[in-house]
Amino acid sequence: MAKEVLQKHDLAFSSRSVPNALLAHDQFKYSAVWLPVGPRWRSLRKALNSNMLSVGRLDFGQNLRCRKVDELVEYCRRSSISGEAVDVGRAAFRTSLNLLSNTIFSKDLTDPFSDSAKELKDLVWNIMLEAGKPNLVDFFPILGKLDPQGIRRRMTVNFGKVIDLLSGLIDERIERGKSDQNADVIDVLLAACKENPEDIDRTHIERICLDLFAAGTDTSSSTVEWAMAEALANSEIMKKAKAELEEVVGKGKVIEEADISRLPYLQCMVKETLRLHPPVPLLIPRRVEDDVDVCGYTVPKNSQVLVNAWAIGRDAGIWENPLEFKPERFVGSEVDVKGRDFELIPFGGGRRICPGLPLAVKMVPVMVGSLLNSFDWKIEYSGIGEFDMEEKFGITLQKARPLLAVPIPL
């Protein structure tokens, strides 16, 4: 059914159902995530794909990504010396945040060695949480003005804080002129704004950046956290991954993107993490603008359509022992996460596939591999059950309790 919706009838299902929460700051009018497919959506998507996520731009940013992963490992090394536990999700969030902020603005938004990003992480998580909550107004639009659960009101506050931060960074760049090094993303977007003001304006630039920070930080960091949690819970898997890393890269070294293709077991671990813990469990809702016939059923005009990637990844009809974390199931398998194999669609599929996929498939294995190869790890016992895998749902899927683990020097 996912293949029917995301591939065969992709165009018919390519509109969005906009939740009432996204009316805050008129985000739905400017965001490439929520705009309907049309000229404006295409120009924004093109700006993203050609300016930030093209092969050339990603290759150009490789050294920067490597530097950010080095900082993550160094942060863990400091904790290992003092014997303190690392909040893996939060540390990975700082790395993802600084990686994005350097790609866009050529600067860190948070100190990589302290918890100065806490407020921003909480802001991003609150945005995802509010956007993912069932909202009475979406079912009974007559309640719109009342906003009985206060979801839109809280979204307005959260969006406002992030937009103020981004607006200040854009002002700073306009005053200072182009970045010192090669043009970063904000330079390219500001240049596009001058050339084609009818296609992209200042507000669009702010909202593209908001989309990128909201969608690109939390999803990557939660995948890293889940992968590390599963490795810690399964000692045999941890041993296999570390043995492969030692053989291919050398014990204790930070891995580079060029190493990934020679680390098939690590790649299988990341795929298995995305199968069991897809970052956006219900993907982003679709909507049909006309009646559509799918497999003999009529999907009525204006229906909202949810694709449950979480349930597909745990379907016993597709996967053997689906609740077991078993990277070996992907050894020698052609199944990939790029939207062509519908039993594994953590990034969606079709024309509205997540544009951040090329960056995520580079970053997540490098972060997980470097953490596993640089230290031995032990879980910090919390008294709740040593390997607590409980989930909490927003639009994204997080560990209900953060993974606290102690890095042990090799």
Image (cartoon, rainbow, N blue to C red):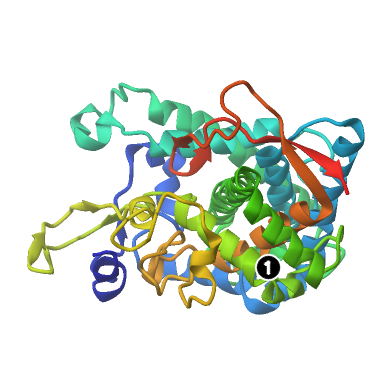
- The residue at the point 70 percent across, 46 percent down is 92
Residue furthest to the right in view is 81
- The residue at the point 86 percent across, 31 percent down is 83
Measured along the vertical axis of the image, is residue 269 above or below residue 217?
below
Q: What amino acid does circle 1 point to?
A: Val
User: Residue 368: where, in percent of width, then height?
Assistant: 69, 55
Of residues 261 and 409, the one drawn nearer to the viewer in this rendering: 409
In what quadrant of the picture does the N terminus appear?
bottom left
- The residue at the point 82 percent across, 34 percent down is 114
Residue furthest to the front in view is 236
Q: Are there few (<14), some (14-19), or many (20+) residues within 10 Å of tag 1?
A: some
User: Residue 132: where, in percent of width, then height?
Assistant: 40, 39
Measured along the vertical axis of the image, is residue 377 above or below residue 105?
above
Measured along the vertical axis of the image, is residue 172 above or below residue 164?
below
- The residue at the point 65 percent across, 58 percent down is 364
Instruction: From the viewer's perspective, tell me whether residue 290 is left or right of residue 359.
Output: left
User: Residue 14: where, in percent of width, then height?
Assistant: 30, 64
Q: Secondary structure at mark 1?
A: helix
Q: Is residue 31 visible?
A: no
Q: Is residue 313 visible?
A: yes
Question: What residue is pinned by disc 1?
Answer: 188
Of residues 227 and 207, the one drawn nearer to the viewer in this rendering: 227
User: Residue 73: where, in percent of width, then height?
Assistant: 83, 49
For residue 79, which quarter of the picture? top right
Of residues 158 and 315, the one drawn nearer to the viewer in this rendering: 315
Q: How many marks?
A: 1
Measured along the vertical axis of the image, is residue 18 above or below residue 337?
above
